[in-house]
Image: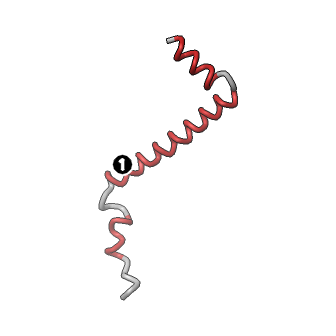
Amino acid sequence: MAGIAGGLYNSIFRRNVVFLSAVFSGAFAFEIGFDQALSKYWDWNNKGRQWKDIRHKYVENEEE
């Protein structure tokens, strides 16, 4: 276990700039993934009740 902890310390936690970069990039990636997952859940849960689902009932085609 000391080998893993030592390697993690030497690669990430030893220098502050690398640690902060890892934290910010991890938070950014988590935010993007969380946003996409919640948007998909919202669309699934509200299918048929959103404007993008009922737009064809109220907007005439531009070709006609």
* 50 relative position to 19: left or right: left
The single residue placed furthest to the left in the displayed view is 48
Q: Measured along the vertical axis of the image, is residue 39 above or below residue 10?
A: below
* 56 relative position to 31: left or right: left
Image quadrant where one finds the C terminus: bottom left
Q: Badge 1 local density, few (<14 within 10 Å), some, or many (20+)? A: few
Element carrying mark 1: helix
Residue displayed at 47% across by 47% down: 35
Q: Amino acid at mark 1?
A: Tyr
Residue displayed at 51% across by 42% down: 31
Residue displayed at 32% across by 61% down: 49
Q: Nearer the viewer, residue 63 or 17?
A: 17
Q: Nearer the viewer, residue 25 or 38?
A: 25
Quarter where residue 22 is shown: top right
Q: Measured along the vertical axis of the image, is residue 34 above or below residue 51?
A: above
Residue 30, x across and y down, in percent? 50, 39
Residue displayed at 37% across by 82% down: 61
Residue 1, x across and y down, in percent? 49, 12
Residue 60, x across and y down, in percent? 36, 81
Q: Measured along the vertical axis of the image, is residue 18 above or below residue 33?
A: above
Q: How is the image coloured?
A: secondary structure
Quarter where residue 16 is shown: top right
Q: Which residue is mark 1?
A: 41
The single residue placed furthest to the bottom in the displayed view is 64
